[in-house]
């Protein structure tokens, strides 16, 4: 079972992904004003590679942006590639 937990201190945040209670990866971001945030890093532990978990993190960030009226600036190369390949999340760019 996978679970994503969102942490936010007001300026920086992270989406942490857990598999069966163990942290498997995270995506970090930094706020850029009131209406934007920058995805700066996405990482999944090597043991969990190839399961689509990093993509789940990027999609969670896109959903958070939608729900909060924010736009995303994907500086992380993985996040940028994921946005380019998935039209359904490009509305938050």
Image (cartoon, rainbow, N blue to C red):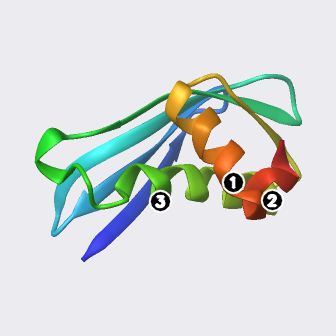
**Residue closest to the eye, 84 or 1:** 84
Q: Which mark is residue 66?
A: 2
Q: Position of residue 89 (x, y in %)?
A: 74, 57
**Residue closest to the eye, 46 or 6:** 46
Q: Secondary structure at mark 2?
A: helix
Q: CA distance from mark 2 to mark 3?
A: 15 Å
Q: Is residue 33 left or right of residue 53?
A: right
Residue 38, relative to residue 16: is it above or below?
A: above
Residue at far bottom of view: 1
Determine the residue positioned at 63% across, 34% down: 80
Badge 1 crowding class, 10 Å Cα cut-off, few under 14, some 14 to 19, many 20 or more, is: many
Q: Is residue 30 left or right of residue 17?
A: right
Image quadrant holding the C terminus, namely top right
**Image quadrant where residue 60 sits:** bottom right
Between discs 1 and 3, the one toward the N terminus: 3
Q: Position of residue 54 (x, y in %)?
A: 41, 49
Q: Secondary structure at mark 3?
A: helix
Determine the residue positioned at 79% across, 22% down: 32
Determine the residue positioned at 36% across, 56% down: 53
Residue 25, relative to residue 73: is it above or below?
A: below
Residue 13, relative to residue 77: is it above or below?
A: below
**Is mark 1 in CB contact (under 8 Å) with mark 3?**
no
**Residue closest to the eye, 91 or 15:** 91
Q: Which residue is mark 3?
A: 56
Q: CA distance from mark 1 to mark 3?
A: 10 Å
Q: Which residue is mark 1?
A: 62
Q: Secondary structure at mark 1?
A: helix
Q: Is residue 62 left or right of residue 67?
A: left
**Is mark 1 in CB contact (under 8 Å) with mark 2?**
yes
């Amino acid at each position: 079972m996978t679970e994503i937990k969102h942490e936010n201190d007001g300026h920086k945040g992270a989406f942490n992904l857990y598999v069966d209670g163990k942290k498997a990866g995270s995506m970090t971001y930094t706020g850029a004003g009131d209406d934007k945030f920058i995805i700066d890093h996405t990482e999944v532990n090597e043991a969990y590679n190839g399961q689509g978990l990093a993509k789940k993190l990027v999609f969670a960030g896109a959903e958070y942006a939608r729900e909060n009226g924010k736009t995303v600036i994907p500086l992380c190369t993985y996040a940028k590639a994921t946005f380019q390949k998935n039209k359904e999340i490009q509305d938050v760019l």
